[in-house]
Image (cartoon, rainbow, N blue to C red):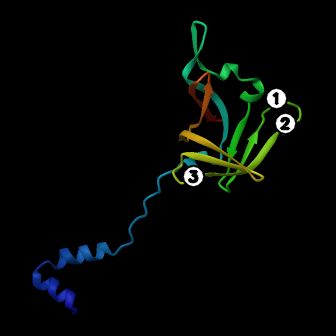
Amino acid sequence: MGWISEHIQDAGYGGFLAFLLLSGCQAAEELPRPLTKADYLIGKDWALASVQVDPGFERGPDIITDLLPYYEACRRDNSWRFEATGQFCFDEGTSRCTAYDPQRIAGHWALTTDERKLVLTVHDDNVVLNLGAVTSQRLQLLSTLREDGEVYTVTETYLPR
């Protein structure tokens, strides 16, 4: 008998300690890794669903917070697609704002380490977009707008098609 078995038996804990030792040596089950924002972005066609501004714009007696009705139809039918390969495609949809706009723009995408910004690269040009909520059912892109000394936050929300 080996030294460990002799001492386990001498201590009277043989069966219990042997069970603990043997079960402790079994391969631990791997826990699934938590999903990242990148996981949620990949493999979907993201279509514009709403555009909100905060604070709202004062237009006469009205406060306008929903900007989507003011977007041209050629901007409302655009979509994004992000692939696991790091490539993305921006599609102009069925209507284009100008005839010479390309139907599709393709490039590479990445998230910053903190997953707060989406970096798009087309040719040698980078565009950095601020991310809001990103889930399997919602993608939010945030931007700021300055008008008459006021700073507005614009939230574009995209849903998967």
Which one is in front, 160 or 120? 120
Q: Mark 3 = which residue? A: 112
**Vertical position of residue 52 compared to residue 137: above or below:** above
10 Å crowding of disc 3: few (<14), some (14-19), many (20+) = few
- x, y (%) of residue 76? 72, 28
Residue type (three-letter) at the residue carrying disc 3? Thr
Q: Mark 1 = which residue? A: 97
Q: Secondary structure at mark 1?
A: loop
Question: Residue shown at 16%/89% (left/top)?
Answer: 6
- Which quadrant, please, contains the C terminus? top right
Residue type (three-letter) at the residue carrying disc 1? Cys
Q: Are marks 1 and 3 in contact (CB under 8 Å)?
A: no
Q: Are marks 2 and 1 in contact (CB under 8 Å)?
A: yes
Give how far apart the Cα atoms at labels 2 and 3 are. 29 Å
Of the residues under marks 1 and 3, which one precedes in the sequence?
Answer: 1
Question: Residue shown at 57%/52% (left/top)?
Answer: 112
Left or right, 146 with reference to 31? right
